[in-house]
Image (tube, grey):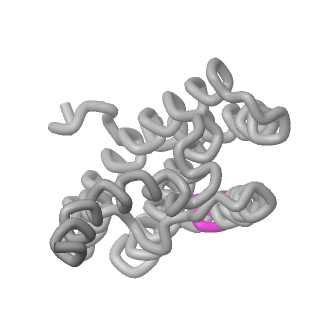
């Protein structure tokens, strides 16, 4: 009887422990922001590495190298902020962004350039929103300061992608 009672209570005991089993600060606004920015940075870096392999257009290649350089610096700052706050960062791209990188990898020539620039524009537009949300709702002064300092950079990346031919509509129109 005791074993049966224990088995029935196990799910409730696990549920009661679940909040303490969660990573510290993973669910607060600032922690979620750091996790979201990590996904964005990883996408910018990985998709731009593909661009260096696939594109023959000097302006696209220069933009891609700029994305790698600037998002790597930003990610190093995000990682330091996250480590100090014990916020776990995703080790890899979320599946939907990995799918985009895989799709880009299968393209070449003008089709690649158009798709890459479109994805850059859409991604940076989304990232601007993430940064604006942190500026509005963030609680941690250092994380908010990072967002404030880097928002103009993300906005510039968006403008550059659009100027190179990227569209902010998913269909590229």
95 with respect to 89 (left or right)? left
The magenta segment: 66-70
Tell me, yes or no, if residue 108 can be seen here.
Answer: no
* Nearer to the camera, 72 or 118: 72
Q: Is residue 3 above or below residue 86?
A: below
* Nearer to the camera, 105 or 114: 105
- Residue at image position (35%, 54%) is 15
Magenta span contains residue 69: yes
Q: Is residue 132 above or below residue 157?
A: above
- Residue at image position (73%, 29%) is 139
- Residue at image position (59%, 39%) is 28
User: Where residue 66 sits in the image (x, y, percent)?
Assistant: 63, 60
- Tally the numbered discs: 0
Tell me, yes or no, if residue 57 can be seen here.
Answer: yes
71 with respect to 63 (left or right)? right
Instruction: Locate the N terminus and report the quarter of the image it occupies.
Output: bottom left
User: Where residue 146 sits in the image (x, y, percent)?
Assistant: 77, 41
Magenta span contains residue 118: no
User: Where residue 160 sits in the image (x, y, percent)?
Assistant: 53, 40
User: Where residue 37 sits in the image (x, y, percent)?
Assistant: 56, 50
* Nearer to the camera, 141 or 171: 141
Location of residue 99 by image quarter: bottom left
Majority secondary structure in the magenta region: helix
Q: Is residue 150 above or below residue 87?
A: above
**Residue lying at the far front of the rendered structure:** 1
């Amino acid at each position: 009887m005791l074993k049966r009672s224990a088995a029935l209570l196990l799910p409730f005991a696990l549920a009661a422990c679940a909040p303490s089993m969660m990573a510290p600060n993973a669910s607060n606004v600032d922690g979620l922001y750091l996790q979201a920015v990590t996904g964005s940075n990883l996408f910018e870096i990985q998709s731009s590495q593909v661009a260096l392999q696939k594109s023959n257009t000097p302006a696209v290649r220069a933009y891609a190298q700029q994305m790698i350089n600037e998002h790597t610096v930003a990610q190093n700052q995000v990682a330091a902020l996250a480590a100090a706050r014990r916020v776990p960062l995703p080790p890899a791209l979320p599946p939907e962004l990995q799918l985009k990188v895989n799709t880009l990898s299968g393209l070449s020539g003008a089709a690649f350039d158009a798709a890459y620039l479109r994805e850059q524009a859409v991604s940076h537009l989304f990232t601007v929103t993430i940064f604006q949300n942190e500026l509005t709702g963030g609680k941690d002064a250092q994380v908010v300061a990072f967002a404030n300092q880097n928002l103009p950079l993300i906005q510039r990346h968006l403008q550059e992608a659009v100027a190179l031919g990227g569209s902010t509509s998913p269909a590229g129109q």
